[in-house]
Image (tube, rainbow, N blue to C red):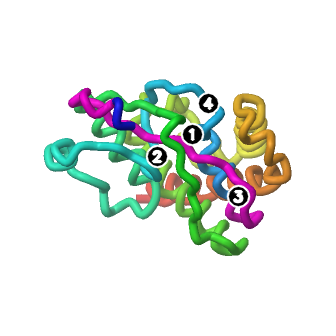
Amino acid sequence: MLSHRSEELAVVSGALRLVPDRYLRLAGNVATFHEYTTALAPSDRPYLPTFSLGVSRRAIARHGGFDERLPRAEDLDFTIRLRRAGYRLHFDPKAAVVHRPSRLTVGGLIDHSILSGRCSIRVRRHYPDAFQMPKFMLRWTVLLALAPVVVVWAAVRAWVQNPDVRRFWLAFPIVVLTRYLWIIGACQTLRDDAAR
């Protein structure tokens, strides 16, 4: 990540190194961060996670930090705002970390997945260009009806595109479960917002 320091408008995120761990923690990491593991090539991205983010103090001072109204997906919102301000968002898998969140129970994983869906759908709705999500999918009835297709597509895509993820194939049931729970949370937010 230090090699990118000379670029004033660069924001760099490292990769997640998937390591054998407690089943739910490992499966949760696979489900949440499959787009950011060490097997993937360096590239510019439309948004970045913040489990290992290099960003200047000046960027934070100019553009603000996390939106405190978002208990989840605040990293997506923050990095998309930086990209819109002209910063280059770069993924560098050489800067790898082991991420050990405290979600070790099924209940914790369920709560995290639903809340992630509730918050990140707000970010997706606010920045549709960053996610390339079709507008019709932002209707809770459509998203819920298409949930089985979306869940299977997302889970299979993660396995096909990422050899790191394929090594931990036993996490597949949790990936599918968390995708469904994410959609439930997203549908709750979309339904609540439509009722206002």
Q: Residues within 10 Å of mark 1 (few under 14, many from 20)?
A: many
Q: Is residue 10 magenta?
A: yes
Which residue position is annotated with label 2? 49
> Residue drawn at (76%, 50%), measured in percent from left and top?
176
- Residue 183 visible from this viewpoint: no
Which residue position is annotated with label 1? 36
Which residue position is annotated with label 4? 40
Residues at badges 2 and 1 in contact (C-beta under 8 Å)?
yes
Q: Earlier in the sequence, mark 4 or mark 3?
A: 3
- Residue 66 visible from this viewpoint: yes
Residues at badges 4 and 2 in contact (C-beta under 8 Å)?
no
Q: Quadrant of residue 114?
A: bottom right
Q: Residues within 10 Å of mark 3 (few under 14, many from 20)?
A: many
Give the magenta range.
Answer: 4-25
What is the CA distance from the residue labelled 2 to the residue labelled 1?
8 Å
Residues at badges 4 and 1 in contact (C-beta under 8 Å)?
yes
Q: Earlier in the sequence, mark 2 or mark 1?
A: 1
What is the CA distance from the residue labelled 4 to the residue labelled 3?
18 Å
Residue 179 in picture, x, y percent from top left: 69, 50
Q: Amino acid at mark 3?
A: Leu
